[in-house]
């Protein structure tokens, strides 16, 4: 069982199951849960898609980083963060310092299947066909995995469960 009260951060690509599993891990630990994207939407009173389309990605990344730093101050907390969050600004350094981080490593083919069936609006995939989404996944993973791989714990499976995460904490 986990020792200490540092928050647990679940990170990984869009569609890797961070929010669903994060909620389940939090309930196993009897800790609180925050989904960073939802936190941002509540704080900003607008959707992530609106922030992207009105202000652009780099403004979103500034907002995301500030929100991440606030949420990381909470103890006894599980936090699911957006797929890009570890890869911008100093975020991964801060995550490593302030949390116990877990990379949910799901295969490209599984991510493509899950994202094809997802109802969550994702600005980076908007209007893309399935083959285009596969290309985006492949290309983004090349630049993002060096960040994801710095997580304290890497769980590599297409069927990650909350029990598996809790057993590795
Ligand atoms: C993003 C992932 C999204 C959200 C935003 C950007 C990304 O979160 O933060 O659309 O850059 O990968 P999820 O990983 O929860 O889909």
Image (cartoon, rainbow, N blue to C red):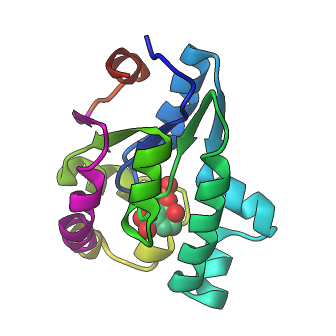
Looking at the rendering, which quadrant does residue 105 occupy? top left
Q: Position of residue 84 (x, y in %)?
A: 42, 65
Q: Give the vertical position of 113 relative to 57 (above or below).
A: above
Q: In the image, what residue occupies the spot 65% across and 79% down?
A: 51
103 within the magenta span: no
Give the magenta range: 135-158
Counting labels gives 0
Q: Position of residue 57 (x, y in %)?
A: 52, 82
Q: Quadrant of the C terminus?
A: top left
Q: In the image, what residue occupies the spot 64% across and 42% down?
A: 34
Q: Position of residue 62 (x, y in %)?
A: 58, 76
Q: Is residue 50 left or right of residue 65?
A: right
* Relative depth, front residue between 33 and 2: 2
* The furthest residue to the top: 1
* Relative depth, front residue between 118 and 10: 10
Q: In the image, what residue occupies the spot 24% across and 47% down?
A: 110
Q: In the image, what residue occupies the spot 35% across and 55% down?
A: 13
Looking at the rendering, which quadrant does residue 86 occupy? bottom left
146 within the magenta span: yes
* The furthest residue to the front: 97
Q: Quadrant of the N terminus?
A: top left
């Amino acid at each position: 069982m986990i020792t200490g009260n540092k928050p647990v951060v679940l990170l990984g690509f869009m569609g890797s199951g961070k929010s669903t599993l994060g909620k389940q891990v939090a309930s196993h630990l009897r800790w609180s849960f925050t989904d960073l994207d939802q936190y941002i939407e509540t704080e900003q009173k607008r959707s992530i898609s609106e922030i992207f389309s009105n202000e652009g990605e780099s403004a979103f990344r500034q907002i995301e980083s500030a929100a991440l730093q606030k949420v990381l101050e909470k103890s006894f907390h599980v936090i699911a963060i957006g797929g890009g969050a570890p890869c911008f600004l100093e975020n991964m350094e801060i995550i490593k310092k302030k949390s116990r981080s877990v990379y949910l490593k799901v295969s490209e083919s599984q991510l493509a299947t899950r994202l094809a069936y997802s109802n969550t609006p994702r600005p980076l995939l908007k209007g893309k066909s399935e083959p285009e989404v596969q290309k985006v996944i492949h290309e983004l993973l090349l630049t993002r995995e060096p960040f994801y791989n710095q997580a304290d714990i890497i769980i590599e499976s297409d069927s990650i469960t909350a029990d598996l995460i809790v057993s590795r904490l």
